[in-house]
Amino acid sequence: MGYSQEDERIIGEQFDKLMASCAKICKNEYDKDLIQRAFFLAKEAHEGVRRRSGEPYILHPIAVAQIVVDEIGLGVKSVVAALLHDVVEDTDYTVEDIESRFGPKIALMVDGLTKMSGVFKTSASEQAENFRKMLLTLSDDVRVILIKIADRLHNMRTLQYMPPHKQMKITSETIYLFAPLAYRLGLFAIKSELEDLSLKYRFPEDYKQIEAKIAETEADRTKFIEKFNAPIIEKLKSNDIDFEISGRVKSIYSIWAKMQRKHVSFEEIYDIFAVRIVFHPSPLIPEKSQCWHIYSLITDIYKPKPDRIRDWVNIPKANGYEALHSTVMGPDGVWVEVQIRSERMEEIAERGFAAHWKYKSEKLSKEEGEFDRWMKQVREALNSSPENAVEFLDNFKLSLYTSEIVVFTPKGESRTLPQGATALDFAYDIHTKIGNSAMGAKINRKIESIFAPISSGDQVEIITSKNVKPKAEWLEHVITTKAKQSIMNFLKKENLNNIANGIVLFEGKLKEYGVPPSARVFRKILPAYECATKDEFYSKLGAGILKLDGIEKILRDNPANKILKFWTLQIPNPFRFLGAEEKKKNKKLVVDPSEETEESQFVIAPCCNPIPGDEVVGYKNEVTHKIDVHKKNCNELIKLAAQHGNNLTPVTWSSHKAMSYLSVLEMRGIDRIGILMELSQVITGELNINIRELHIQSHDGIFEGRISLYVKNIKDLRMIMEKVRRIKGVEQVNRVENKIE
């Protein structure tokens, strides 16, 4: 089954567009021929296949190749690999076929892309190994990751054709791994678009509202930017500087994240845009000097905010980003961020890692060294044996998406670490042996704890001892991938005996009560002792961290979840979690409100504590074999969806009895006599709400408080919050829930 005449016309147009873009990277006729041969092979391999949108499948690899050349700036071999990236995975062609036609380098890239696809299509048990293969490819040839990011970007741009549960899985993977990877590789524009598209499909109403607000305020914003820019333009021109100046609005996602993080409205966010100055450098003056010269000219006009200067010119980010950022007080008392870059810096900021090769020189050796150091850390992670895919993915992600600090060794060597790093992170960054034996640190020649946080500019010296060894609590004091991995590897060796001892102790205790170890027993035991797995429970028990006091009561308990008895679970594929016999009987999974057995298949997620009316999503817990119900914006859910997307299932609230659900509110405002009495009167008197706990602290005329209360649903909670906001002196009222990272 081939394509129609209209299909062929569209395919031809898109390929001609690609070839026009490739004209700037093709050095000779051989390069053009290579791309054309790749196109014809891909077209033949995907002949007659269509995407969910109904369009010919070949348009997808063409679009990916277009992103690779136009938005990332890669070369001919990468374009060829992009055109062929699905051929081995989806057709009968093999890697050997690709190698015989296009050579070993392109074949290796296609093989790497095929392995990467497997990361997100396999079960958790297979995921770790596939993810390691992906990283091996990353460490060998970063172009593979860049092409995969382009592939993900095009899939996100066409996500409207996927069913909702697939959208949830794909957006979670994107926000959890692909956006951070794009950031780490310097692809800021792509990173922002991936985040925006994820928000668009996860929270469409929020996205539309912010998009509309940005459009509504565009005229006023344009007028302000023109007013702000006018004296700067005049000043720079009078100093014979060749430049371009523009005002750019922040991404919708970054605005939304800030609104969630700070619990503020769109109108309360002042820094929704930044002014960017890109200059053509003079060949006689160093770029750094020209950046600071422009900064001095601007601060002659507008006063800077001293704590908001970001000097990434002298010390670039680990991903190569260079720029000078400053926040200045503009007209009408508005703070404005100004970004100063050369044309070279601008291209690196837009194209990321790919742009480094264009500007490869001695000047960039340091920045390339930073990237090489990160790649070295990736390789070191590969040499370890993580316990599970989740752990490995979490630790790797930590190395991707974080602000950075620069600290110095006693000899003056600079080391780049994530913001929030401790002296122990620094010790492991130097060498695993130093980290494993670290007992203290000298920070700026002052003796400090090994757990002490370090700041940019600190000089750090590590004090070691042969008598020191890593402990489990060390994991709470490190944030870098290398440190966490090194500590866990050490503990893993130590914990093998603990697990064996724990098994003996536990089974011995169960024998006393005549209870055999079973899945039902562990469904009670693990949550009671706050353990995720049996191995964790055994290890802690064997190490003496846990005691079996009170286990008899735990075994006897038959807790019934009073909240979740009132939910109806609706699944697009209703047979997803059902056996063959049940498939014939069930069209929808319904929770019976009268059912009071401990075998209820639903568990409310303690990380986000949803209540009736909250948008919720179900996740099949492979340990408890029950469905955990999370709020849709729960960070833990995003992580789970990225790692085990096939375990997601939609959950909706059914009609429920007049029951109460615990919620927590935080308040802040101006203190006055009688505010506590009025607060209690509004909640308990007017609204007849039962308060569980109330804590109020007052200092310097400001009060801060926290209320735990019982509500029937989200509507009631919002009404309470609105009533409390009207109380004189109350400035802020926010629901306590997991924060957006």
Image: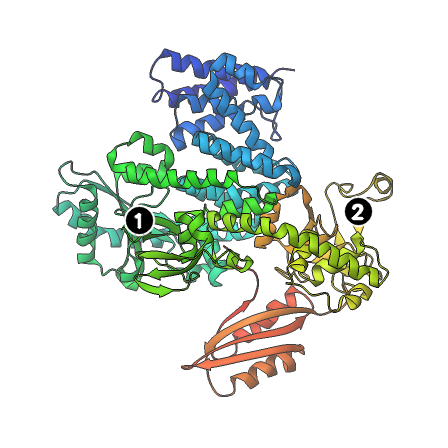
Precedes in sequence: disc 2 or disc 1? 1
Say above or below: 505 vs 485: below
Q: CA distance from mark 2 to mark 1?
A: 60 Å
| Front-most of residues 323 and 5 | 323
Q: Confirm whether residue 633 shows in the render.
A: no
Pointers 2 and 1 in contact (CB under 8 A)?
A: no
Q: Which mark is residue 631?
A: none
SS for dot 1: strand
Say above or below: 253 vs 584: below
Q: Confirm whether residue 162 shows in the render.
A: yes
- What residue is rendered at 46% in x and 46% in y? 399
Whole-percent x, y for residue 700 in the image: 40, 81
At label 2, the amino acid type is Lys
At label 1, the amino acid type is Ser
The answer to whether 212 appears left or right of 706 in the picture is left
- What residue is rendered at 49% in x and 45% in y? 195
Q: Quadrant of residue 344?
A: top left
SS for dot 2: loop
Colouring used for the render = rainbow
Whole-percent x, y for residue 677 in the image: 56, 86
Rendered-image quadrant of the N terminus: top right
Whole-percent x, y for residue 708 in the image: 62, 73
Task: Give the label, 2 or 1, closer to the camera.
Answer: 1
Q: What residue did someone put label 2 on?
A: 588
The answer to whether 48 appears left or right of 228 in the picture is right
Please, which residue is most extreme toward the front here?
466
Question: Counting other residues with Cα less than 10 Å from the Cα at mark 1, is it few (<14), some (14-19), or many (20 or more)?
Answer: some
Whole-percent x, y for residue 160 in the image: 58, 38
Q: Which mark is residue 414?
A: 1
- What residue is rendered at 27% in x and 51% in y? 412
